[in-house]
Image (tube, rainbow, N blue to C red):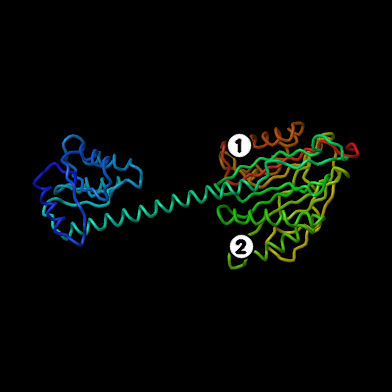
Amino acid sequence: MVDDDPVFAAFVEQLVLSLGAEFPCTLQWVDSAERGLEELGRASYDLVLLDYHLPGADGLHVLAQIRELPTAQQPAVIMLTGSGNESVAVEAMKRGAKDYLCKAGLEVAPLLRVLNSALTQKQLEDQVASYNTQMRADLELARRLQQSLLPVRFPVFRADGALGDSALRFEPRFIPAMDLAGDFFSVLALSESQAGVFICDVMGHGVRSALVTAMMHALVENEAPRTPDPGEFLAALNRRLTRLIQPEEGPMYVTAFYGIADVATGQLRYANAGHPRPLHLRRRLGTADALPAPRPAGPALGMYPDANYGTGECSLEVGDVLLLFTDGLYEVASADGAEDYGKARLQAAAKENLRLPAGALCEALIGDVRRFSGRAEFADDVCLLGVDVVRLANGGS
């Protein structure tokens, strides 16, 4: 209790002691704001009865100092006011006090009610704070685990069996919009010359989407080496995913692209499940075009268990870049909200920067989108993967 009136303090102490087993506690009295803050620094208290009129600093100042303590160390504050000072009580509650008592005519019943109410609020706040702390720790662990699923080192692919640098170079950029992301990519060594390149975007954000990306990682790692045709691979992935996600859990779908780049034959074979079509940058020709849509064009994964996915094919040359991305990169509003960045701008920016190495190209595209929006942050997850064709067995013709 912080109150400069020793007579009133003794009266309140007698009221508190009279509560007995209904509210077992001990009470410590100090007569100034300074001594009150010293006592709170010395010992841990559950409740503080705080007078507004104090010598030196007033009760609102003490309340502000209490609110700066770590949440777990903050006692519940009940403001003591004189008659006619209800406005002070209201202001105190706006600043974090749990309740107030009028000093005039104070009796046992209202004192017990207010003490119990304030203590209950404090206990609930402590429980919420503990839950939030645990939740943040769990989310951080989940974020680290999810990050660990993304490749940081890439396999070496040989065009003709000779030793040396990889015939394919990979440049990823991953920008999650939240702690847990719904985008995912993977690069798999199917053989010495064949690279399986997978990218997907799981519907939504948060924990549920992150769990699905973890499932996708396991499914891709398990299925890709066994299924040499990209269309068949996506169909197998789709069947597995629709069995894992039950309809009663609500809709959940995944857009995905999977390609197999073979540096021995100079061919890319690919399939698409409702995903933005990657850009094929041909530096020799100075073009940046979306890969033709394979037929049949299958839906996103997880929608229809018997969906079919066609396999497309195109030739690769030395100097080509394949640019895989999720829609968070281009579905970005301008600073005035009048229009989206869109696929056309992305394609034009890729063509303008196609002479850059794949890593610098990715940075240039991200920078262009940020300038367009006027914001450094993205509202959706962004996943971007540049694949630079460095060497082919046939020399690239």
Q: Which mark is residue 251?
A: 2
Q: Which mark is residue 387?
A: none
Number of numbered discs on residues: 2
Where is residue 37, by image quadrant? top left
Residue type of the residue flagged with mark 1: Arg
Query: Which is nearer the eye, 66 or 177?
Result: 66
Task: Locate the C terminus by quadrant.
Answer: top right
**What residue is at 61 percent from the left and 46 percent from the top?**
147
Q: Secondary structure at mark 2?
A: loop
**What residue is at 84 percent from the left and 34 percent from the top?**
284
Rate crowding at label 1 as few (under 14), some (14 to 19) or many (20 or more) other CA atoms within 10 Å.
Answer: many
**C-alpha span from label 2 to label 1:** 31 Å
Residue type of the residue flagged with mark 2: Pro
Sequence-first tag of 2 and 1 = 2
Q: Position of residue 344 (x, y in %)?
A: 71, 42
- Residue that label 1 marks: 370
Q: Secondary structure at mark 1?
A: helix
Q: Position of residue 38 (x, y in %)?
A: 24, 38
Q: Position of residue 95 (x, y in %)?
A: 30, 45
Pick out the residue farthest to the bottom: 248
